[in-house]
Amino acid sequence: MRERAAVLLTRRGLLPKSLRGDYTGPGLQRVCPESTMTTAKPTVRPTVPHFSSGPCAKRPGWSLSVLTDAVLGRSHRSKIGKAKLKRTIDLTREVLEVPPDYRIGIVPASDTGAVEMAMWSLLGPLPVTMLAWESFGEGWVTDAAKELKLKPLTVLKAGYGEIPDLAKVDPGCDVVFTWNGTTSGVRVPNCDWIAADRKGLTICDATSACFAQPLEWAKLDVVTFSWQKVLGGEAAHGMLVLSPRAVERLESHAPPWPLPKIFRLTKAGKLNQGIFEGETINTPSMLCVEDYLDTLKWAKSIGGLKALIARADANAGVLADWVKRTPWIEFLARDPAIRSNTSVCLRIVDPSVAKLGPETQAAFVKGVAAMLEKEGIAYDIDAYRDAPAGLRIWCGSTVERTDIEALTHWLDWAFASSKEALVQAA
């Protein structure tokens, strides 16, 4: 039956060359196949089917037993509670290789809270440049333009899969940007575009880059991230990293707008040092703290930042090799220099799918993802709701390369099966 379907698809011109394989004539004459993609289910399954881009997969070997030492039923301001929080900050510095004169604080509301805290507390004295090439960057633009009403404000935008012209960033301005676009699969290639002698501050949302991509700390004044991304921690807690230049701005600039309590980083015009020593603004989950501590210890045990980056690179490399040999799929980010190694975004380019209307095309892609979820192969790999229709596969440091390798075969299966159904329906 699959042979008859392949003949039919080839006659209609709907089967890509690499899928035509051995069905070249009116009968079933066999030639050397170009692809092993088939509607027969693969035999090797990912051990862990968690490829969500947030919250992300837990570290290898994780279990609930790692939380048994959590400080539960005690105040986070107790001696033991504060020690845990301080240990969290110290291990973050060690694993991320943050300079000793940078401050690190645990703040509310995940990465979003950390970015908002930085924007509302630091922006205003200088012109501001906002960079946006995906959903979260667009959100920061909205805050700057409509909520803070910053002027003068320059917005440099690019579509999904692309990046703005970084050479247009004025070093005399404060700049707010996302290092790695979680919803677009695009990252900045480096910090060469940031002037060492800049006048403005750089505020960087690095939540899906930290622990998987090298950050040039000397060029970054504010870095934010959340626990639930590259290290697979639990949600609701953010991290705020401040350079000495950022601290100087905090102590010399009083925002003209009201600041809610959870945004206040200063007391009587001076930095609130306690925030950066484990005295959190509001009550943290000590269960989540324990979980994050466990993953930091794991990261340190495997070789620290270098090993974490290597794991993410290897995972993304598996997908890159698969894309290279697979005609129906392409990266959303065409330029390898700006392509993410964590939130890898893909688009289906097979002609029979690409010619569909936007809604039908989106439904097809969702169907592919749904098939994999139903099989227990991959969860939450749909593109972000505001992004173009496609697949988004997390390749961060807590994912095993063998699971990515197994997933590629199942992606081929799900596409082949979905396309066969599409052609039959037509």
Image: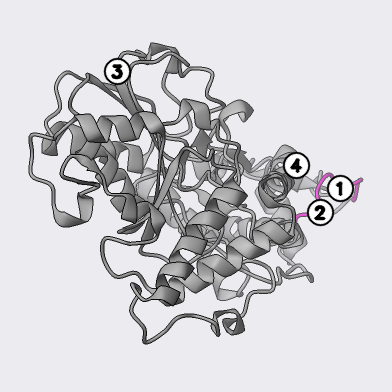
Question: Is residue 36 located in the magenta-colored stretch of the structure?
Answer: yes
Instruction: Decide: few, some or many residues near mark 3? Use Cα within 10 Å; few <14, some 14-19, many ≥20.
Output: many
Q: What is the quadrant of residue 294 in the picture? A: bottom right
- Tell us which disc is closer to us: 2 or 3: 3
Three-letter amino acid code at disc 3? Cys
Which residue was labeled with disc 2?
36
Residue 263: give x, y in percent of width and height.
21, 50
Three-letter amino acid code at disc 2? Thr
Instruction: Decide: few, some or many residues near mark 4? Use Cα within 10 Å; few <14, some 14-19, many ≥20.
Output: few
Q: Are marks 2 and 1 in contact (CB under 8 Å)?
A: yes
User: Which quadrant holds the N terminus?
Assistant: bottom right
Q: Is 401 situated left or right of 173 in this image? A: right
Residue at coordinates 21% horizontally, 39% vertically from top-left? 121
Cα distance in 3D space between marks 4 and 1: 19 Å
- Tell us which disc is closer to us: 4 or 1: 4
Query: Under tag 1, what secondary structure?
Result: loop
Which residue was labeled with disc 1?
33
Query: Under tag 2, what secondary structure?
Result: loop
Residue at coordinates 60% horizontally, 37% vertically from top-left? 214
Which residue was labeled with disc 4?
321
- Tell us which disc is closer to us: 2 or 1: 2
Residue 135: give x, y in percent of width and height.
34, 42
Tell me the tag on residue 173. Answer: 3
Q: Which residues are magenta?
A: 30-37
Cα distance in 3D space between marks 3 and 1: 57 Å
Q: Is residue 335 visible?
A: no
Instruction: Decide: few, some or many residues near mark 1? Use Cα within 10 Å; few <14, some 14-19, many ≥20.
Output: few
Observer-nearest residue: 207 or 244? Answer: 244
Question: Is residue 334 located in the magenta-colored stretch of the structure?
Answer: no
Of pointers 3 and 4, the one earlier in the residue sequence: 3
